[in-house]
């Protein structure tokens, strides 16, 4: 799923976030809070009430003044990756594979940086890959992501709220967002509470640039509704305009609420998405 050269490059980066939540264990991210790690920050004059064990007696011997050492605290970042497993996602094999590869890459970067990772295949009927930390779990994670199956019963945004992880600081959503835009935006607002949210909207080439023409019977893979349509240049132009308006509405709502948003096509390579698009958006450093 992730070639070795891609994994080596992924391990050099980490996810940027303005929101950290303290976990039960130390991580590798420097906090603005001073704590008891081994990473020395600076000295400051001793004040009544400070722990006398933090006094540096070597400095006292040289200056005859009491100073205490300050150390940078380390915090772990809790990350959740949610994958849309609805029928519209796995109907196209290339789209389904690209979506799972994206989830694996996002999770791998977190594991390589001692972040705590939870992967949630929404609606797939599988238990989440929950609360794993450390690159030692990367092979297990990739095997799990690769094994995830799609579902035929439910639309993603109608149920995603029930999968929200309360202790998460940063959540990635990988979905095609091919549902009513009002429902999508409403659910994003609810998911955003007390965390930073990033939405990756993934569409297939056929969805973005339909090439089929003629008289067709179209079937919605999720609702099973059918419609007879004659696809000509005018109809295709109208379709593209409506799709563009749909995506723009979601993007606008995300920007207004400080939600990260990225629109992708399956024709874009994984390394371009991660190392170019996500870095350009300031998600990676």
Image (spheres, rainbow, N blue to C red):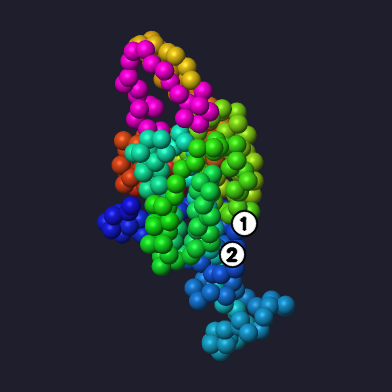
SS label for mark 2: loop
Label 1 CA crowd tier, 10 Å (few <14, some 14–19, many 20+): some
Give residue 248's position: percent from left, percent from top: 49, 27
Give residue 265's position: percent from left, percent from top: 37, 34
Give residue 80's position: percent from left, percent from top: 53, 52
Measured in 3D between alpha carbons, the distance from the residue under mark 2 to the one under mark 1, in whole angstroms, is 9 Å
Q: Between residue 259 and residue 56, name the one nearer to us.
A: 259
Residue name at image x 36 percent, y 44 percent = 97
SS label for mark 1: loop
Residue 197 vertical placement versus 26 (above, below): above
The tag on residue 260 is: none
Q: Between residue 65 and residue 239, name the one nearer to us.
A: 239
204 horizontally vs 195: left or right = left
Question: Does 219 lie within the magenta span?
Answer: yes
Q: Which residues are magenta?
A: 203-225
Question: Does 4 lie within the magenta span?
Answer: no
Q: How many marks?
A: 2
Residue 123 seen in render: yes
Q: Between residue 116 and residue 281, name the one nearer to us.
A: 116
Residue 134 vertical placement versus 102 (above, below): below
Label 2 CA crowd tier, 10 Å (few <14, some 14–19, many 20+): some
Tag 2 near tag 1, CB within 8 Å: yes
Classify residue 94 by image quadrant: top left
Dot 1 corresponds to which residue? Answer: 167
Dot 2 corresponds to which residue? Answer: 23
Residue 248 seen in render: no
Residue name at image x 64 percent, y 41 percent = 190
């Amino acid at each position: 799923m992730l070639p070795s050269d891609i994994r080596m490059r992924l391990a050099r980066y980490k996810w940027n976030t303005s929101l950290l939540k303290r976990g039960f264990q130390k991580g590798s991210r420097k906090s603005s809070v001073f704590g008891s790690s081994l990473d020395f920050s600076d000295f400051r004059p001793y004040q009544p009430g400070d722990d006398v064990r933090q006094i540096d007696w070597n400095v006292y011997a040289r200056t005859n003044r009491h100073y205490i050492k300050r150390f940078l605290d380390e915090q772990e970042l809790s990350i959740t990756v949610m994958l849309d497993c609805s029928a519209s996602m796995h109907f196209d094999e290339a789209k389904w594979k690209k979506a799972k590869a994206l989830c694996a890459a996002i999770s791998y970067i977190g594991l390589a940086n001692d972040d705590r990772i939870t992967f949630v295949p929404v609606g797939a009927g599988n238990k989440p890959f929950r609360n794993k930390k450390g690159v030692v779990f990367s092979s297990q994670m990739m095997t799990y992501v690769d094994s995830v199956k799609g579902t035929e019963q439910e639309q993603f945004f109608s149920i995603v709220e029930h999968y929200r992880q309360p202790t998460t600081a940063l959540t990635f959503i990988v979905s095609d967002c091919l549902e009513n835009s009002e429902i999508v935006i409403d659910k994003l607002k609810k998911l955003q509470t007390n965390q930073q949210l990033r939405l990756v909207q993934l569409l297939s080439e056929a969805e973005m640039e339909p090439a089929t023409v003629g008289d067709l019977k179209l079937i919605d893979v999720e609702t099973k509704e059918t419609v007879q349509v004659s696809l000509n240049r005018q109809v295709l132009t109208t379709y593209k305009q409506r799709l563009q308006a749909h995506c723009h509405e979601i993007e606008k709502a995300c920007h207004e609420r400080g939600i990260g948003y990225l629109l992708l096509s399956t024709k874009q390579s994984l390394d371009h998405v991660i190392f170019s698009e996500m870095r350009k958006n300031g998600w990676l450093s």
